[in-house]
Amino acid sequence: MSPRKRISERFKTATIAQITSITLVWYIIAIVASRLITVVIAPGIGIETGIYHYHHILWGLILMTMGAFIGLYWESRHSQVFGAFFLGLGLGLAVDEVGLILVTADHGYWDPITYPIMILVAQLLFIAALAARQQGR
């Protein structure tokens, strides 16, 4: 059996705990990648049109909507795993910008309050995965 078929078969039998774990992993990847890109690779780079600057919270909301739609509309486990990928990425991008939403002071994006909020969301996802595993789902 080819590796692609094995992965596809594994996705078809994914449990709710595994799907939640996928969301958690991609949430963390999105936050880490976003912070690294902001600091190291491309500080100040963004998409702008006229007077509008599109922060990555917009892309996060779009990805979360796509993930939720995919996971809820199609009932197969395979599509729910695919939706969890988008949901995790989108949630990570959206939560990463919580400093811009909550804080209008000098710190903004880098405000220290952002880190506990990021950790809280990760903990909630982790607890959800553990709860699903405990229930055998």
Image (spheres, helix red, strand yellow):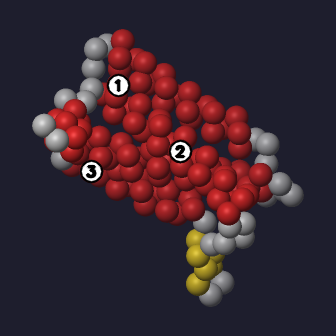
Kindly state the secondary structure of the residue where label 1 is placed. helix
**Does 52 sit left or right of 85 as displayed?**
right
Of the two numbered discs 1 and 2 in the rendering, the one whose residue sits closer to the viewer:
2
Quadrant of res 79: top left
Of the two numbered discs 1 and 3 in the rendering, the one whose residue sits closer to the viewer:
1
Residue beneath the point at 55% across and 53% down: 93
- Asked if marks 1 and 2 touch (Cβ < 8 Å), the reply is no
Q: Amino acid at mark 1?
A: Ala
Badge 2 density bin: few <14, some 14–19, many ≥20, Cα 10 Å:
some
Q: Position of residue 34 (x, y in %)?
A: 61, 54
Task: Look at mark 3 in the image and give the residue it sits on.
Answer: 70
Residue beneath the point at 13% across and 37% down: 1
Q: Earlier in the sequence, mark 2 or mark 3?
A: 2
Task: Look at mark 1 in the image and give the residue it sits on.
Answer: 17
Task: Give how far apart the Cα atoms at labels 2 and 3 are.
Answer: 20 Å
Task: Look at mark 2 in the image and give the residue it sits on.
Answer: 29
Q: Position of residue 90 (x, y in %)?
A: 47, 52
**Does 70 sit left or right of 99 as displayed?**
left
- Exactly how many numbered labels are in the figure? 3
**Does 41 sit left or right of 30 as displayed?**
right
Kindly state the secondary structure of the residue where label 2 is placed. helix
Q: Position of residue 130 (x, y in %)?
A: 43, 18
Quadrant of res 97: bottom right
Residue beneath the point at 30% across and 46% down: 82
